Image: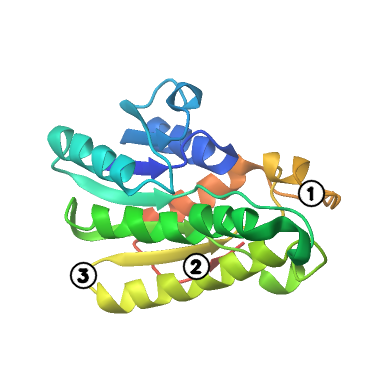
């Protein structure tokens, strides 16, 4: 089986995707802000910060030394500043955009030379119309930017597949950061991971709405 690089491998969906891939026989290179939180079966646990391009380059160089069969790159990282736009300040705005958009841009552009032709890039988007509420402004703006970023990346790199996943409400630590109520029909991270894996295995691309 092939190799995968998961950026944000310690979070809810990133951890679930790593576990699903490993169970299917993939080798997984996991990267996270705190590598000790990455699922134990990962082939290699590495650290990166979405705001630090050098740390991203270091991960890419290490994976390049270990793999010549990288066929999946998934950007599962993301955080938010949850408050009114006139309160979060520049630091909160930049932190939200760095983790959701700039990190996706940097990890993708630095990973392009690692992957085999026809490889798959995965990103976690959102149903924006569900999130246009008070205190979610920076997050909604960042996810809207990510959506457009993925669209352009796909057009500029037609040798590869690009998928923006809109998972809907998923039971992850995200809900501990906001005052919104987790819907009773929320998916588990494992369900989202299985849907992503099915998309990769079938070789499809484009938006994946769950």
Q: Which residue is pictured at 77% across the width and 59% down the height?
A: 87
Reading the image, the residue beneath label 1 is 178
The disc label shown at residue 159, or none: 3
- For label 3, the crowd category at 10 Å Cα-Cα, with few meaning under 14, some 14 to 19 and many 20 or more, is few
Q: Which residue is pictured at 52% across the width and 46% down the height?
A: 194
Q: Quadrant of residue 13?
A: top right
Disc 2 to disc 1, C-alpha distance: 21 Å
Disc 2 to disc 3, C-alpha distance: 20 Å
Q: Nearer the viewer, mark 3 or mark 1?
A: 1
Tell me if residue 139 can be seen.
yes
Residue in front for this viewpoint, 120 or 125: 125
Q: Position of residue 157 (x, y in %)?
A: 25, 72
Residue 8 against residue 124 in the figure, above or below = above
Element under disc 1: loop
Residue in front for this viewpoint, 70 or 142: 142
Q: Quadrant of residue 104?
A: bottom left
Q: Quadrant of the C terminus?
A: bottom right
Q: Nearer the viewer, mark 2 or mark 3?
A: 2
Specify which label sits upstream in the sequence, 2 or 3.
2
- For label 2, the crowd category at 10 Å Cα-Cα, with few meaning under 14, some 14 to 19 and many 20 or more, is many
Element under disc 2: helix
The disc label shown at residue 37, or none: none
Q: Is residue 59 left or right of residue 162?
A: left
Tell me how the rendering is colored: rainbow
Residue 206 against residue 72 in the figure, above or below = below
Reading the image, the residue beneath label 2 is 146
Q: Position of residue 95 (x, y in %)?
A: 56, 52
Q: Is residue 29 left or right of residue 80?
A: left
Q: Which residue is pictured at 25% across the width and 54% down the height?
A: 110
Residue in front for this viewpoint, 169 or 174: 174
Specify which label sits upstream in the sequence, 2 or 1.
2
Residue 70 against residue 117 in the figure, above or below = above
């Amino acid at each position: 089986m092939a190799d995968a690089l998961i950026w944000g491998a310690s979070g809810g969906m990133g951890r679930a995707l790593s576990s699903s891939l490993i169970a299917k026989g993939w080798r997984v290179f996991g990267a996270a802000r705190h590598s000790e939180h990455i699922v134990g079966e990962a082939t290699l646990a590495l650290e990166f910060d979405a705001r630090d391009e050098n740390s991203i380059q270091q991960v890419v160089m290490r994976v390049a030394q270990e793999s010549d069969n990288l066929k999946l790159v998934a950007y599962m990282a993301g955080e938010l500043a949850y408050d009114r736009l006139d309160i979060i300040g520049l630091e909160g705005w930049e932190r939200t955009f760095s983790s959701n958009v700039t990190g996706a841009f940097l990890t993708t552009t630095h990973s392009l030379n690692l992957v085999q032709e026809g490889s798959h890039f995965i990103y976690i988007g959102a149903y924006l119309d569900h999130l246009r509420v008070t205190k979610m402004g920076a997050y909604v703006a960042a996810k809207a930017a990510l959506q457009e970023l993925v669209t352009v990346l796909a057009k500029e790199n037609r040798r590869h597949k690009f998928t923006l996943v809109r998972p809907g409400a998923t039971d992850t630590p995200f809900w501990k950061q906001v005052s919104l109520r987790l819907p009773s029909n929320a998916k588990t991270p494992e369900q989202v991971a299985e849907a992503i894996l099915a998309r990769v295995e079938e070789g499809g691309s484009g938006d994946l709405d769950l």
